[in-house]
Image (spheres, helix red, strand yellow):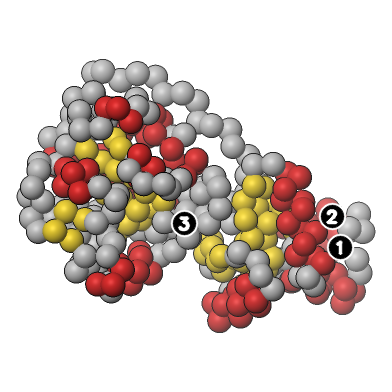
Amino acid sequence: MSNSPLVNYTKISPNKSSPRNHKIDTVTIHCVVGQCSVETLGNVFAPTSRRASSNYGIGYDGRIGMYVEEKDRSWCSSNAANDNRAITIEVASDTKEPYAVTDKAYAALIDLLVDICKRNGIKELKWKADKSLIGQPDKQNMTVHRWFANKSCPGTYLYERHAQIASEVNKRLGSTNIKPAPEKPSVSLYRVQTGAFKVKANADAMLTKVKAKGFDTYMVKVGDLYKIQVGAFKVKANAEAMLKKLQAAGFSAFITTEEGAGKSVDELAREVLQGKWGNGEERKKRLEAAGYDYAAVQKKVNQLA
């Protein structure tokens, strides 16, 4: 039994049962509840006291980690029978509903599932969203953690995309029994961001500061910036309420609908010219506090003025 050649990082967890007692015929996708790296997830699964693991994990940046070889059963889904027959995959996600994952993590998930299916003779993924079909892989070979424990895992974001995931994987497997996938749920997430930093130590300091004020916050690395976010909301009013709380606590923040990103330099420059960011030192402080490159924005302002 082989492992995926797509793996970028390996840290085998002691939390496993070796070997698994059933052939692989199922996949179970989980959400981590944290936009973490594969290294961080490996550290989470390292202590024996944790009593948890997964076969694979996908970081926010799309890198893939392996923590339990496919020949062994991971301790992931609160159900021994399921984990003995399933490949379990933890995917880095936001810390609040709908527990969204990055585009890079989603793309890596599809790649990994295609590879798993090819190597294990799974001709197609089947999803009916039917708990009663557990253990009947001929009818449904995708399961979710929430069916075995009082958890929301894999979160609304991934759960609602299971039919789409199956369809995308099956197209690449060349399945002749592909049903059209429903359109990708148009979940517009309003993310509240308070700072972005090139130096991770500065981002860590801000993360600690925001958490000290009682906010459930996390860090997302996008490009060369470490961005501090406090929630992702389906309802804009909820994001605005969080924004007000952050501002009341003394933090500069803004709402963005882009994952881990804010406004473009061009858009910011136009807003500056409209007087929305103040003048002089006030402008510089506000732009930098919001995680933007003041010099780049000002350069564009000078070009447009």
**Relative vertical location of residue 294 with respect to residue 173 in this rendering, above or below:** below
- Please name whichever residue, 269 or 124, is drawn nearer the observer in this view of the structure: 124
CA gap, disc 3 to disc 1? Answer: 34 Å
Which mark is in front, 3 or 1? 3
Quarter-wise, where is residue 161 in the image? top left
Q: Which residue is mark 3?
A: 33
Query: In the rendered view, would you say 292 is above or below 184?
Result: below
Disc 3 residue crowd, few under 14, some 14–19, many 20+, Cα 10 Å: many
Q: Secondary structure at mark 3?
A: loop
* Sooner in the amino-acid sequence: mark 3 or mark 2: 3
Percent position of residue 48, x then y = 24, 72
Residue topped by disc 2: 271
Q: Are marks 1 and 2 in contact (CB under 8 Å)?
A: yes
Residue drawn at (18%, 61%) of the image: 16
Q: Residue at 20% x, 49% y: name it.
A: 80
Question: In the rendered view, does 298 fall on the left or right side of 262?
Answer: right
The numbered mark, 3 or 1, whose residue comes first in the sequence reads 3
Q: Position of residue 256 (x, y in %)?
A: 69, 51
Q: Exactly how many numbered labels are in the figure?
A: 3
Give SS at disc 1.
Answer: loop
Residue kind at label 3, given as amino acid type: Val
